[in-house]
Image: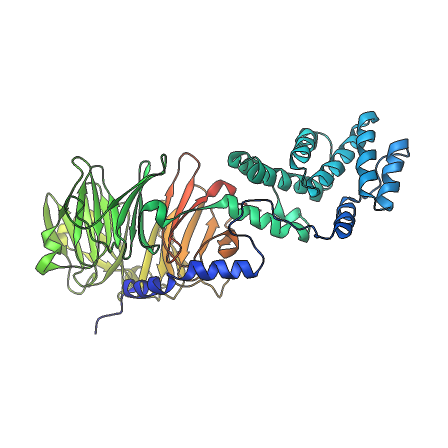
């Protein structure tokens, strides 16, 4: 009996996930979160008397403002009386006369807070920006007050000034751990708005938001879906071209894998292998994998001038010097290939039922395949769904239900990461990508789990950070200009993540 393919499971899950965005919208709406309005979230009571009390209570100073000068005393009296208008008036008078820097700083922050809470956002912005150089310089305030000012500057920049770049600059300075609990939701809301951007199926011109493949080609993203075809999306001009079946746009609607080479784009489906010429914008079907030879293409890997194809049912193939050849020796690497990765001269092959298999591609004529178990028997999983190289010494091995493994060749050491150990959000690992800062892994039900390279600290990205779906079928990375991570989801389309905003604290 043939093993059940992950692609079949994903396809079934993709169909179920088609309704997921509607469910998410309902849940967030019931929770009182605005998913449509791009504005600063309201947390002030609607009742006028309660609102006045809220503003004055939040604006209370500890310790009291300055020495017993005329206006500082009156500010304290107004605060004690919970009189919003008198507090604001005397703060303005105090700032007009006071010269002592620390008192001016405290008064400015207090007045800025009152302006903010009264929705006088531009007045608040002017005061916050006026005192920020002092805070970054020689004057100090409690860390919570500093980070509250940073949070509000970021909010005003994004929602009122519509300046996303400035908002990101302020947000990158924010230490959310220093904020009081009352600001946590605001910080998370801002994070969702800045960290992730959705690239909707409508923008791509596709009819399916279940993503199966994404590859970067310069300024373009090639995006494949389970049932809605293929699109090439320009990141600079935000325009897409859709390739549909027929004529010059000869590509399957069901895309499983994409590989980019200098002059071609290879597209694998569960029916055939197609290739797109960048020179003349034409499509060609590869006869060795179509028609009577119809083949389920699961993964494609280009290494120098050679192309390797992993299939479900027909094993591993190689294209070299315009000639196709199946590669196998006895039972290895088997008929069912999920993923491919290379380190140096070794091609690592993730199979559906035989674990990891390796092949020395420089000595390929000898046909020598080696089961990974002969090197290290520490990987118990047989269904390997993701392989990711980290430098020349480390291979990350993602499995379907058995978590994640890290193997270091020189020491031949294996470390196992799993949901039960607390490092990753789910043991079904579907995708992975490496950046200069971190390693990211897409899971089947747990969103994105990632580890910072410098600190070895694990973190997660899920619904709270703005992911539209927890099923991450594909991850890819564009290093320039800002460093963007692209995640393909089941049911939620494509999302772009700004890596610079991830906080390692």
Q: Image height check: is 153 above or below 285? A: above
Q: Is residue 311 visible?
A: yes
Q: Is residue 416 visible?
A: no
Q: Residue at the location (46% across, 52% down)?
A: 450
Q: Residue at the location (61% across, 52% down)?
A: 185
Quadrant placement of the N terminus: bottom left
Q: Position of 292 compared to 173: left or right? A: left
Residue at far bottom of view = 1
Q: Residue 78 at what x, y percent from top left?
A: 86, 41
Q: Residue 224 at what x, y percent from top left?
A: 28, 50
Q: Residue at the location (42% across, 49% down)?
A: 439
Classify residue 322 by image quadrant.
top left
Colouring of the image? rainbow
Q: Image height check: is 198 above or below 125? A: below
Q: Residue 171 at what x, y percent from top left?
A: 57, 40
Q: Position of 96 compared to 402: left or right? A: right
Towards the viewer: 257 or 138: 257
Q: Image height check: is 5 above or below 307? A: below
Q: Residue 204 at what x, y percent from top left?
A: 33, 46
Give the tally of numbered discs.
Answer: 0
Classify residue 111 by image quadrant.
top right
Q: Position of 188 compared to 477: left or right? A: right
């Amino acid at each position: 009996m043939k093993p059940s393919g992950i692609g079949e499971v994903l396809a079934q899950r993709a169909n179920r996930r088609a309704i997921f965005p509607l469910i998410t919208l309902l849940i967030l709406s019931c929770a009182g979160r605005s998913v449509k309005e791009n504005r600063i979230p309201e947390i002030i009571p609607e009742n006028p008397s309660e609102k006045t009390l809220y503003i004055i209570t939040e604006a209370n100073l500890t310790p009291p403002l300055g020495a017993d000068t005329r206006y500082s005393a009156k500010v304290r009296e107004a605060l004690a009386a919970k009189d919003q208008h008198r507090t604001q008036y005397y703060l303005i008078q105090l700032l007009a006369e006071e010269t002592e820097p620390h008192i001016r700083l405290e008064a400015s922050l207090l007045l800025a807070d009152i302006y903010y809470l009264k929705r006088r956002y531009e007045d608040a912005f002017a005061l916050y920006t006026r005192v920020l150089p002092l805070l970054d310089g020689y004057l100090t305030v409690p860390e919570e007050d500093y980070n509250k000012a940073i949070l509000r500057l970021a909010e005003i920049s994004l929602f009122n000034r519509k300046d996303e770049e400035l908002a990101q600059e302020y947000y990158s300075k924010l230490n959310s751990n220093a904020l009081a609990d009352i600001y946590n939701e605001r910080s998370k809301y801002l994070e969702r708005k800045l960290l992730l951007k959705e690239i909707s199926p409508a923008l791509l011109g596709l009819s399916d938001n279940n993503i199966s493949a994404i590859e970067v080609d310069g300024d373009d993203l090639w995006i494949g879906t389970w049932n809605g075809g293929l699109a090439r999306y320009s990141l600079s001009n935000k325009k897409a071209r859709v390739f549909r079946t027929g004529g010059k746009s000869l590509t399957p609607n069901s895309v499983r894998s994409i590989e980019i080479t200098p002059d071609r784009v290879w597209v694998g489906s569960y029916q055939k292998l197609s290739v797109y010429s960048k020179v003349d914008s034409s499509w060609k079907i590869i006869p060795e994998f179509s028609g009577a030879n119809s083949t389920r293409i699961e993964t494609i890997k280009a290494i120098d001038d050679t192309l390797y194809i992993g299939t479900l049912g027909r094993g591993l193939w190689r294209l070299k010097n315009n000639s196709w050849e199946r590669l196998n020796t006895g039972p290895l690497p088997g008929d069912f290939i999920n993923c491919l990765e290379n380190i140096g001269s070794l091609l690592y092959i993730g199979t559906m039922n035989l674990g990891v298999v390796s092949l020395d591609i420089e000595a390929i004529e000898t046909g020598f395949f080696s089961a990974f178990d002969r090197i290290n028997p520490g990987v118990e999983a047989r269904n390997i769904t993701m392989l990711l190289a980290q430098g020349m010494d480390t291979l990350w091995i993602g499995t379907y239900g058995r978590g994640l493994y890290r193997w270091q060749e020189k020491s031949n050491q294996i470390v196992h990461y799993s949901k039960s150990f607390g490092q990753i959000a789910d043991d079904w690992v579907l995708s992975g990508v490496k950046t200069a800062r971190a390693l990211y892994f897409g899971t089947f039900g747990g969103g994105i789990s990632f580890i910072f390279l410098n600190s070895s600290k694990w973190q997660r990205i899920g619904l709270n950070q703005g992911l539209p779906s927890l099923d991450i079928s594909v991850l890819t990375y564009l290093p320039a200009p800002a460093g963007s991570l692209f995640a393909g989801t089941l049911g939620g389309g494509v999302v772009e993540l700004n890596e610079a905003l991830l906080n390692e604290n």
